[in-house]
Amino acid sequence: MNQDQLIQKIVEEVITRMASSGSIKTSDASSKGAAPTASTAQNAVPAAQAASAPAGDVILASDLAKYIDHTLLKPEANEAQIAAVCEEAAKYHFYSVCVNSSWVEYCVRKLGGTGVKVCAVVGFPLGAMDARAKSFEARTAVANGANEIDMVMNVGAMKARDLKTVREDMLAVRRACRPGIVLKVILETCLLTDEEKVLACQIAKDIGADFVKTSTGFNKGGATVEDIALMRRTVGPKMGVKASGGVRTYEDAVAMIRAGATRLGTSSSVAIISGGKGTSSY
C-alpha cells in the first residue's frame, strides 16, 4: 500500500468513526474531497495555483511577499517592535502581520489604508485551553478588526484519538468568526504521527477551516517539506496550507511553496525577500 492509498484509508476510517459518533453526516461530501465551503472557496485561487505550479517555475524573491504572514509572537514583544513589524509589512507589501490577540487593535490602526491584513493567533501556543476560551478570544480579535485567525488545535485530544473533541474545538472557533474571516488551524505537526496529521487535516476541512498550518514555532520542531506535501495531498488543491516555524531563507520559502504551501508564517520575512541581505528591525 503506497502513501496515498494509506491516506485514503485513514480518511475513510475518520469519516466512518465520526459518522458513527454523530459528529458528521455520512452524506457530508466535504469530508470526501467534494467542493469546499464558501469560506474556503473565497481563498481557493492562490491555493490551487501554488499546488499546481510546475516544479521548474522560477519564484522571484519579490513575489514571495504575497505569501507571507509577517510574524511577531514573542511574549516580550513591545509596542515599538510591533510598530516595526507593521511598518515593514506596509513597506514590503506582506500579506498580513501575525500577532498575539492583545495587539490586534493597535495593528489595525497602524495598518489602516495599507492593504495589509491583521492575523491573530488564538489558543496560542499550547492549544490546551477550553474551547469556549478559544471561541471568546477569536470573537474578541475579530471584533477588534482581525481579518484572520490562526487557532491551535487541541493536540492532546488528537493524541488520545478523541476526534469529537478535536472537531468541537475547531468548530467553536469557526463559529466565532464572522463570514469572510479566514480560519487557519495549527496542527503542531512535530507532535503528531502522519496518521494524526491526516486526521487533523480532514477534520479541519470538514468544519470549514480555510487553511491548515504546520506549527506554532514554540515547540520542538517547525515546518518540513514532507509535512507540507502530506497536508496538501490530504486537503486537496483548493484549501490553504500554511508553512510556519523555521522558514528563514529564500530557499526555505521556495521549497515550502513547491511542496504545496500557499502561505508562509515567518519572522524572517525581510531576509527572505531580500536574498538574506535585509534584517527585521526588532
Image (tube, rainbow, N blue to C red):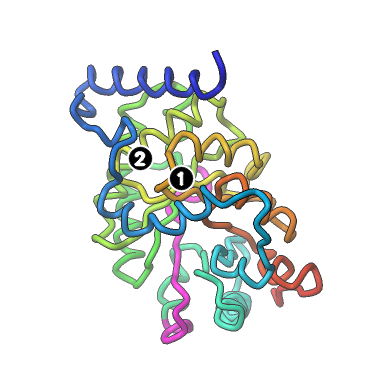
Q: CA distance from mark 2 to mark 1?
A: 8 Å
Q: In x, y percent, where is residue 231?
A: 51, 38
Q: In the drawing, does residue 142 fall left or right of residue 267?
A: left
Estimate how packed mark 1 is, as few (under 14), some (14 to 19) or many (20 or more) residues with alpha carbons within 10 Å.
many
Q: Earlier in the sequence, mark 2 or mark 1?
A: 2
Magenta region: which residues?
109-126
Q: In the drawing, does residue 246 fall left or right of residue 36?
A: right
The amino acid marked with disc number 1 is Val
The residue at the point 49 percent across, 62 percent down is: 100
Mark 1 element type: strand
Residue denoted by label 1? 212
The residue at the point 43 percent across, 38 percent down is: 235
* Tag 2 near tag 1, CB within 8 Å: yes
Q: Residue furthest bottom?
A: 113
Q: Is residue 124 magenta?
A: yes
Q: Say which of 148 and 78 sits in front.
A: 148
The amino acid marked with disc number 2 is Lys
Mark 2 element type: helix
Which quadrant of the view contains residue 106?
Answer: bottom left
| Residue 45 higher or lower than 171, as above or below | below
Q: In x, y percent, where is residue 83?
A: 57, 80
Q: Residue furthest top?
A: 1
Residue denoted by label 2? 205
Which quadrant of the view contains residue 42?
Answer: bottom left
Q: Say which of 158 and 57 sits in front.
A: 57
The residue at the point 66 percent across, 62 percent down is: 59
Q: Quadrant of the N terminus?
A: top right
